[in-house]
Amino acid sequence: MGSTDGGNGAVFTLADVSKHNTREDCWLLINDKVYDVTKFLDDHPGGDEVLVTATGKDATNDFEDVGHSTTARAMLDEYFVGNINTSTVSLKPNYAALKQPQDNQEKGSDLLIKLLQFLVPLAILGLAFAVRFYTKSA
Ligand code: HEM
């Protein structure tokens, strides 16, 4: 069936694939292969929304995370339009880089909590002394 789709020898860049990011024209990149799923949108058991949001990037993880059946995997062939120029896409997301800002943020809020743990009792103590001082003189 794939042979009737044409363009089997085509090699696309991620920028090429990214242009097809609407319900009217929807391409996906899964496991280094490019699929035109426009005609499949209405039939996808997981809905069309997830497919459109999976455009413009490497959708391999999105596809694999769902744990698609072998039937689902066999369906891919039908929508195959070409391969990807792998140098245009970072196929493995850099988890270390993604995690970094989060770590920094956590460190930031840790510091704030430590600072508050120090300042709040100090403020209460100060308040107690102030109250004592003013009630004495009155
Ligand atoms: C051409 C690509 C795709 C095909 C042919 C496909 C096909 C299917 C099929 C046949 C099912 C039914 C369950 C099964 O047999 O595993 C399914 C379910 C599902 N798919 Fe896909 N899928 C594709 C891409 C995607 C992508 C990229 C995502 C996520 C971003 C996705 C998300 C889902 C979800 C969430 C379900 C579960 C629906 C449910 O059980 O309620 N699919 N898909």
Image: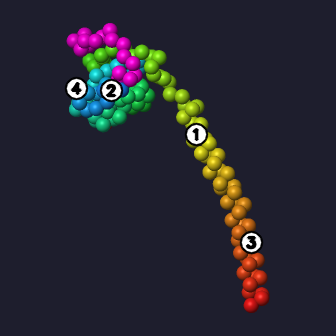
**Residue at point 28%, 19% (across, down):** 79
Viewer-nearest of discs 2 and 1? 2
Q: Count of labels shown?
A: 4
Distance from label 4 to label 1 (Cα)? Answer: 39 Å
**Residue at point 40%, 22% (across, down):** 14
Q: Is residue 135 left or right of residue 113?
A: right
Note whether residue 28 is visible.
no
Residue with the mark numbered 2:
19
Q: Amino acid at mark 1?
A: Pro
Which callout, 2 or 4, points at the residue further toward the start of the chain? 2
The answer to which of 131 and 13 lies nearer the viewer is: 13
Residue with the mark numbered 1:
101
Which callout, 2 or 1, points at the residue further toward the start of the chain? 2
Residue 76 lies in quadrant: top left
**Residue at point 28%, 35% (across, down):** 47
Distance from label 4 to label 3 (Cα)? Answer: 70 Å
Q: Secondary structure at mark 1?
A: helix
Residue 6 lies in quadrant: top left
Q: Amino acid at mark 3?
A: Leu
The answer to which of 104 and 40 lies nearer the viewer is: 104
Residue with the mark numbered 4:
39
Distance from label 2 to label 4 (Cα)? Answer: 17 Å
Residue 36 lies in quadrant: top left
Distance from label 2 to label 3 (Cα)? Answer: 63 Å
> Mark 1–mark 3 contact, CB under 8 Å?
no
The answer to which of 8 and 46 lies nearer the viewer is: 8
Is residue 14 in the magenta section? yes
Viewer-nearest of discs 2 and 3? 2
Residue with the mark numbered 3:
125
Q: Secondary structure at mark 4?
A: helix
Viewer-nearest of discs 4 and 1? 1
